[in-house]
Amino acid sequence: MNILAINAYHPNASAALVQNGQLVAAVEEERFNRVKYAAGFPTQAIRYCLGEASLEIEDVHYVVVPRNPWARLWKKLFFAARLPRFPADRAHVMARFAGLHYQLAEALGVAPERIRAKFHRLEHHQAHLASAFFVSPFDQAALLSVDGLGDFASAMWGVGHGSKMEVKGDVAFPHSLGIFYTALTQYLGFWKFGDEYKVMGLGSYGEPAHIEKFRRIVKPGPGVGFRLGLEYFVHHQRGAEMTWSSADETPVLGQLYSDELEKLLGPARKAEEPLERQHQDLAASQQAALEEARRLGIGAHEGVYAAMHGPSYETPAEIRALRTLGADLVGMSTALQAIAARHLGAEVLAISLVTNLAAGLSAHGLDHGEVARLGAPTGEDDFAGGGTDERGDLVAGLLDGATRLARGTVRTRRVAHHAALPRRHRLGYFVTSRG
């Protein structure tokens, strides 16, 4: 089986060829056109890979592209409504990839009908994980991919076993360690695409004297992952200005940091200004913050909570529709209250108790009695419930963590404590924070 992979219209345009599970060739277009980080279509890289395997395009069974326009569609639609340029940019990208079959034929100088391979779109970070694991000598491994952004995600992790790979979680736009590092690289006066390595070297001369400030810029969690202090960035407000569709030009990336970053760290260094001790310390602090943000915590993930009015349970058809729209959780409370509180300017921290799997996902029928029993509080504002078992300790721990997260007074309302919950249920509690 011959598989040709193509990374096109993205920095480091490249191609790779795997033959019967063995990596035969992999090369970037820049090796041929001598343009650093070349984007565009990797014509010469594709020809090289086919030549190394002594193959014609007719011999290729699959062509794989590390781009899936349908991945995280709900988030893309959300930001499309907020970023005026986003819909046009997405449409332009999708149009290019829709014609990939014909572009490949043109690049190789053959008729399109000679290309009999099946085309597959693979999500960006899944492609990273797969390219690392499936051609490695390991039968099992932990997998991690972290970069700027791809298919609206900036990081993904999972496990590989034999010929299978299981994704365990990801971090979605607008949070990105790659964007964090590039933005601070620009702030330190290095504006050329790919200059991040200079900041890594610069940091070795300094000390992380500004780490406390950097902990406001990027921070671990919640749970597994990391988050940016978005007030210090602009990509989520107006999109990232980028030019990387041409194979004969080095990509160009617009400014990613906001004026708030300069208020926090001081004036940005201009490219022609000398490097001083403060810049070395800023670079060292940046590297330290990056390493802190990579630490893992408890199992948790970001998701979409869909609010339904009830009082009836959702039907299996409704659940399938909600999942298609991007919902991870469905409930009749919390979401509406959180929206109302945010509209009034309150800071919100909400933890919900989920008592059952949705219709069509559970092995048994939905039972209102079970929901009422599991959700019954032991008493108004009684969150400890005696605290004599591990559930009481867990509830107390949740509220203690909520207090620290909210960094202010936490008010609890009818927080339930249960003696036991079946393993299939998820435990959570509703908490309102300072407003």
Image (cartoon, rainbow, N blue to C red):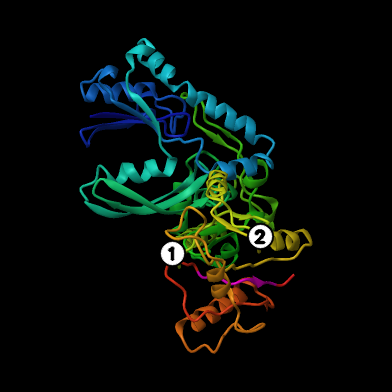
Q: Residue at x 56, y 44 (%)?
A: 321
User: In which image quadrant can residue 219 be found?
Assistant: bottom right
Residue 431 falls within the magenta-colored stretch: yes
How many residues crowd mark 1 within 10 Å: few (<14), some (14–19), many (20+)? Answer: some
How many residues crowd mark 2 within 10 Å: few (<14), some (14–19), many (20+)? Answer: few
Q: Is residue 413 left or right of residue 226?
A: right
Residue 423 falls within the magenta-colored stretch: no
Q: Is residue 428 left or right of residue 126?
A: right
Q: Residue at x 21, y 51 (%)?
A: 139
Which residue position is annotated with label 2?
311
Res 430 visible: yes
Residue 219 circle label? none
Give the percent coordinates (x, y) of residue 435.
75, 70
Closest to the observer, 375 or 58: 375
* Residue 381 versus residue 407 in the image, above or below: below
- Farthest residue in the right direction? 344
Q: Decide: marks 2, 1 in contact (CB < 8 A)?
A: no
Residue 296 circle label? 1
The magenta segment is: 427-433
Q: Is residue 389 left or right of residue 25?
A: right
Give the percent coordinates (x, y) of residue 211.
54, 66
Amino acid beneath label 1:
Leu
Amino acid beneath label 2:
Pro
Instruction: Give the Cα separation between the discs numbered 2 and 1.
Output: 38 Å
Mark 2, mark 1: which one is toward the viewer?
2
Q: Residue at x 60, y 75 (%)?
A: 404
Give the secondary structure at mark 2.
Answer: loop
